[in-house]
Image: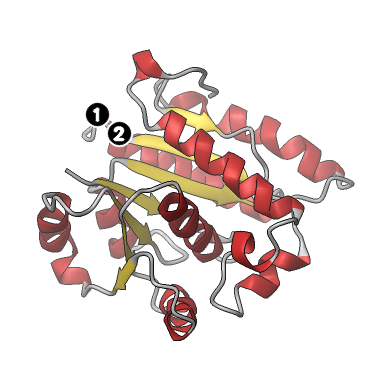
Amino acid sequence: MAIIISIANQKGGAGKTTTAQQIAVELSVVGYRIHVIDMDPQASFTQWYRHRRKQGLNSFSVVTIPTGLLIEDLSELKQRSDLDIILIDCPGNIVDITMAAVQASDAVITPVRATGLDLEATKYMILFVASVMKENKNLRFMLFHNAKHASRRLDKEGEISLVKATKSIPGQRAFILKTAITDTAAVAEAGMTGLSVREYAPKSPSSSQYRKLIMEILECLKPADKQISASA
């Protein structure tokens, strides 16, 4: 049975689609069978994927699903024996699409930029996920620092703010991932080529960071008694 992971944050520009792209490739590389659902009206993931296919790179599948059919289709996809993980690239706000996706998910991953507006918007996302967790007892929630600038004081304080904001979520179900993704040119440039950072600039700091991020995500998806470590 496949697990469903939504990439979501109500703040636009947080890096949801870029995160979904990198996660899809990294999970494929380590052997997971991935199916991506592009629910963002801008269809940026789908456009990037079309560039990949033109280059003969299609290690996972991508579809769009009408909002009204999402729950029904997810139920069917989850039962497929040829899939391991279903990734949903959600739109940049908490609308019906995002609500439905999160409610049907086994995990939610939220990239967060350490700006005042982003941190404030993420608090609403946290409250929303916390409310869904009351009904969905298996839902895991992961947040990580995206587009990090080491020299900025706000970036350094961002993790502290996230830890405080997630205190309302039950322990062992919310995780502040230790790996932060640095804001590098390789990330932006890769997005225009249909490649992942691993493929476009394998020696860049961001490439190794995404590999570490995937290992953390997979660890957090394990049952609580099998996790090596957890933070929240």
Is label 2 in contact with label 1 (beta carbons under 8 Å)? yes
Q: Is 185 situated above or below 182?
A: below
Res 133 label = 2
Q: Residue at x 66, y 53 (%)?
A: 207
Image quadrant of residue 128? top left
Three-letter amino acid code of the residue under disc 2: Met
- In the image, residue 139 sits, relative to residue 117, either above or below, namely above
Question: In this orientation, does residue 4 appear?
Answer: yes
Residue 115 is at least partly visible in this image: no
- Residue at 56 percent of width and 71 percent of height: 195
Residue linked to disc 1: 137
Which residue is the extreme one toward the bottom? 54
Residue at position x 22%, y 48% in the image: 104
Q: Secondary structure at mark 1?
A: loop
Query: What's the residue type where badge 1 is placed?
Result: Lys
Dot 2 alpha-carbon crowd within 10 angstroms: few under 14, some 14 to 19, many 20 or more: some
> In the shown orientation, is residue 44 left or right of residue 148?
left
Percent across and percent down for residue 144 are 59, 42
Q: Secondary structure at mark 2?
A: helix
Dot 1: few (<14), some (14–19), or many (≥20) neighbours within 10 Å?
few
Please indicate whether residue 80 sits to the left or right of residue 194 in the image.
Answer: left
Pick the front one: 59 or 117: 59
Quadrant showing the N terminus: top left
Q: Nearer the viewer, residue 79 or 56?
A: 56
Q: Position of residue 141 (x, y in %)?
A: 42, 37
Q: Position of residue 198 (x, y in %)?
A: 61, 59
- Residue furthest top as drawn: 225
- Give x and y (percent) for residue 7: 43, 54
Q: Looking at this rendering, what residue extends furthest in the right direction?
A: 151
Query: Real-space Cα distance between discs 2 and 1?
Result: 6 Å
Left or right of 117 in this view: 28: left
